[in-house]
Image (cartoon, rainbow, N blue to C red):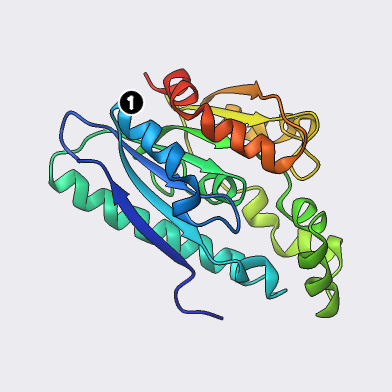
Amino acid sequence: MQDRLFQSEEFGVSSQAVATVIFICPYGTPIEKVRFAIQRLIRTGYHVVAYQTTTAVFMDGDPMILPELISQVRDDIRSRIEKLKSQGVTEFGFFGSSLGSFILYNCVGCEIPELRWGVFNTGGNIAQGVWTMAAAKERYVERGWSLPQLEEAWVRLQWPDFGRLDGCRFVFTSSRRDRVAPLRNIPQYLEPIRQAGAEVKVCEVPAVNHKTTVVMGLWKGPQLVRMVRR
């Protein structure tokens, strides 16, 4: 397993008057490819801390990489938030797409209580989503994993303990034509968040597949952030 499973970069100027957005790229997507979405957030008035993750998380066929990736990114976010708080920054939100959305799903609440609002740009069952990716599925099958086994390996990530989310506001985006993270699958993941006290909305975007669903969500980034930020 690789020691470093992600890279990060900061954009814009942090200050007491500027909210920081933790931004995690879609699976297999470098920061440079979604710079357009980051720049739109900066122009709207945010400071952005962006993350890109290794493709090995799925392409190595090792289910232990995903929890390690989440742990590494989570620790780095905590460290950056503490540094920014020492500089006077008081407001933190997030925008995660595809895999980035799932990582942040495992960061909110008791894990990183400073993340009070944010956008899950697509969401759903991570194992079932990976199983729609032919190359990734092949790698897991080669190493002896079935879909039910993968779901069991990731069950604690799929259903994390949020603690209390009172006062938090989140929005999920998806499309009816997204095969990887379809709109119809989102409601079952909303109830635990709502029971924890968060206000949650779902925003449907026009798209023809998972990739275009993610891109449309990225393009609507400032609008979606406005929807959840108090």
Q: Label 1: how many residues lie within 10 Å, few (<14), some (14-19) or many (20+)?
A: some
Residue 162 appears in view: no
User: Can residue 80 be seen by looking at this rendering?
Assistant: yes
**Figure quadrant of the N terminus:** bottom right
Closer to the camera in the image, 36 or 158: 36
Check disc 1 and report its element: helix, strand or loop: helix
* Percent position of residue 213, x then y: 67, 35
- The image quadrant that residue 209 belongs to is top right
Vertical order, 128 against 142 (above or below): above
When the figure is inspected, residue 226 is found, relative to residue 91, above or below; the finding is above
Estimate the x, y position of residue 83 in percent, counting from the top left: 20, 52
Image quarter of residue 140: bottom right
Looking at the picture, how far across and down is residue 56, in whole percent?
A: 61, 71
Q: Residue 6, position in %: x, y?
A: 46, 65
**Left or right of 124 on screen, residue 176:** right
For the C terminus, the image quarter is top left
Q: How many marks?
A: 1
- Closest to the observer, 25 or 157: 25
Residue hosting label 1? 44
Q: Is residue 10 left or right of residue 122?
A: left
Which residue is found at the position 39% from the left and 46% from the top? Answer: 112
| x 51%, y 60%: residue | 70
Task: Name which residue type carries label 1.
Answer: Thr
> Residue sitting at 33 percent across and 42 percent down?
48
